[in-house]
Image (tube, rainbow, N blue to C red):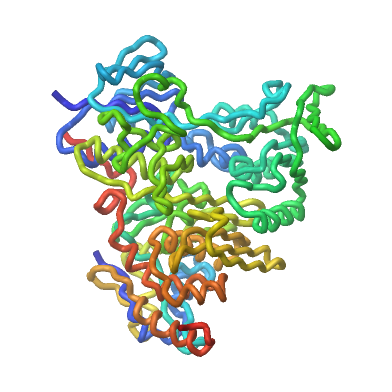
Amino acid sequence: MKVLKITPERCTGCLRCEIACSYMQVGAFQPAKSVIRVSPFEGHTSYAPYTCTQCAEGWCMTACPVGAITINAAGAKDVLDDRCVGCKLCTIACPYGTVFYDPSTRKAFKCNLCGGDPACAHACPTAAIEYEDVPTADWLHDFARERASHVLATNGGGR
Amino acid sequence: MARRHLIIGGGTAGMNAMRTIREEEREPSEITLVSAEKPYSRMVLPYYLDRSIAESHVFTASAALLAQWKVKAHLGRRVTALDVKTNVCTLDDGTKVEYDDCLIATGSAPVRAPVPGADGRNVHSFWTLDECRGVIASIAPGSHVVMVGAGFISFTILNSILALGAKLTIVEVAPRILPRMVDAAGAEVVESWLEAHGVAIRTDVKVTKIEDAKGKKRLKFAAGADLVCDVVIMATGIKTNLDWLKGAGVQIDRGVVVDDHLRSNVPNVYAAGDVAEGRDLVSGQPALHAIEPTAQEHGRVVGANMAGKDVAYKGSLIVNIVEVCHLDAASFGAWDDAKAEAVSGLKRDRAAYRKLLFSGDRLTGAIIIGRSGDVWTTNDVGMLKGLVQTGVSLGRFKDHLKAHPFDVKTAYIASGTTGALLPETVLGRPSKAPGETPVAV
C-alpha cells in the first residue's frame, strides 16, 4: 500500500500541505480543516507534518457504532458522511489523535489519502511529504526527540 | 458436524462476535442469536432523539445482513435458563437451543432511583430504543424536562433535549456533576459552561418523591424547593442483566468473571461487554467497563476465539467522551486515582482543563475538557488516549508535560508513541472494513 512518507528534515513550515489538504477535504483554504497538521519545534525554527498512519487496527473504524468508517480504494480509512452521526467515538478511539470533528457539519473527518492522489504530497515543494509504496513508520520520532530535547534544555526543563 | 455457536444478546458485543466468527473461521459454523430486542446501536439513540437521523439508521442487523451471515435469529426472545452441563439453553417461549460454545452478552438495564412515583406517567428512563421513543413522544418545544442524575447517560442526551426546544434542569444527588467521569475541578468547568448555556443544575439534592400535579410532574427533595416540570428522565445508573444466569454454575462477581480469552469458569461459555468482568488495561485488575469500546473489543476477541483462533486480550481501557453545548469532556484510564502523581492545568477563560496522572514516567490517566471547535482539543483527546494506551516511557518529557500540561503533542511525538502503536492490533491482524465479512462456504 502507498503511504504518506514524511521526511521531517525537509519541511520548511510553509503550510502548503495544510492549505492543499483543506481545499481537497472541504473546498476551503483553511488549515483548521486540514487533516495533516504541521507542528513547530525548537521555537518555530523547524517543523514537521503529522497525519493519519492508516494503521492496521483502524481504531476509528472498529470503534464506529454505525459502520460509518470504511477502507477506500487507496487503502485509507474513510468516513462515510451519510452514515456518520457525529458521536465522536472515533475521535477518542484513535490513539494517534488524527480523527477530527467538524462542529459545522457535525461529522468526523480524517485523512483518506484523497482517494489515492494525496494533495499534500503534490503541494509540498521540498518532498518532505511523498506518496510511496513503503511500510508506514514513525517518521517524526527521532526528529522530534532531538529537537524537543533542545527546547527542554534551553528552558531548563530537561535533565 | 458444524460447530454451533450461541450468541446471547444482540448489542455491540454480540454483533462484533458474530461478524468476527465469520471473518476468522475456516469451516462454516452455525450461529444462533437470541436477542431481546432487534439489534441497534445505543450510541446513536441521542441522534435519533433529536431527529437528526431516521429511526432506520439506528439498526445494526438488518434481515439481509443476518441472512448474509447465516445467523438463525430469535429476536424478541430472552434466555431463561442455561444448562452448562448439557449445553442447552431455554428461551422464554420454551424453545431449546443446543450449543457447542456460547457468548453471554446481555448488557445492562437502567435503574431508577427508588422513590415513590419513579414509575409514574411521564417518568422515563433513556436506555432502550423503546424508551427513546417514549421520550420523543413526551417532549414538545417549550416542555420543561428534569433529568435526575448528572452522569454520562444524561449528558449524552443533553444536546438533543435542548435541540427539541425544551427547557432543562438537571438534579444530582452527588455534590457535583459527572462524578464518575471527571474530577471536581473539571466538573466545575462543565457546570459553569452549562449554566452559561441556559441549563439549570442542582447538585447535592436527593429526590424523595415524584407526584402528578395538574398534568405536570412535581419533584420533592429531602431539602430545598420542589420542582414542577412536564417530563422527568431518570438517568440514575445501570445494572448488569445477569439475574437469569444466577445458579447456572457460571461464576459471577460484579459481572461474569472472565480470563484473558474472555472465557468464564465454564470453558465453552464466554462473556463480553457490560456483563464481563475482565482485565483493566491500566491496573491489570478485574473490572466491569460498561462502555461501547470495551463491548466492541470484547466481542471481537470472543468471536476470534470461538472461531478457533487463540487471541488473548490485553485489557480494556476506560474512555469516555461527551459533548455538551459544544464543550468536550473526556477522560481515560485511571483518571480518578487519588494516590497518583498528578498535574493539572486550567484556562478558565477558554473553559479548558487538563489533568494528567502518572505512574513513574508513564501516563496512566487523563482528563481533558475544552471547546469542541478548538482543533487543539480534538488533537489532544486522541493523543492522550495513545499515551495511556501504550504506557510509553516519557523519560524527560514527563517533566515537559508537568510544566506544560496543554502541550501534549510534543511529548507524544518525541516519546515515540506512534512507533509503539503501529504494530498493535486487537486480533493480531489488520482489521477488515464493515461489510467486508466473507462467509466460509
On the picture, is A79 further left or further right than B182? left
Quadrant (top left, top right, bottom left, bottom right) of the N terminus of chain B: top left
From the viewer's perspective, is residue A134 above or below residue A95? Answer: below
Q: Could you say which quadrant of the image residue A5 lies in?
A: bottom left
Residue A58 pos. (x, y %): 35, 55
Quadrant (top left, top right, bottom left, bottom right) of the C terminus of chain B: top left
From the viewer's perspective, is residue B309 above or below residue B336? Answer: above
**Residue B81 visible to an observer of this rendering:** yes
Q: Nearer the viewer, residue A142 or B74?
A: A142
Residue B155 pos. (x, y %): 63, 45
Q: Could you say which quadrant of the image residue B308 lies in?
A: top left
At x 47%, y 80%, the residue is A15
From the viewer's perspective, is residue A114 above or below residue A81? Answer: below
Residue B389 pos. (x, y %): 41, 58
**Residue A30 visible to an observer of this rendering:** no
On the picture, is B58 further left or further right than B312? right
Q: Nearer the viewer, residue A10 or B52?
A: A10
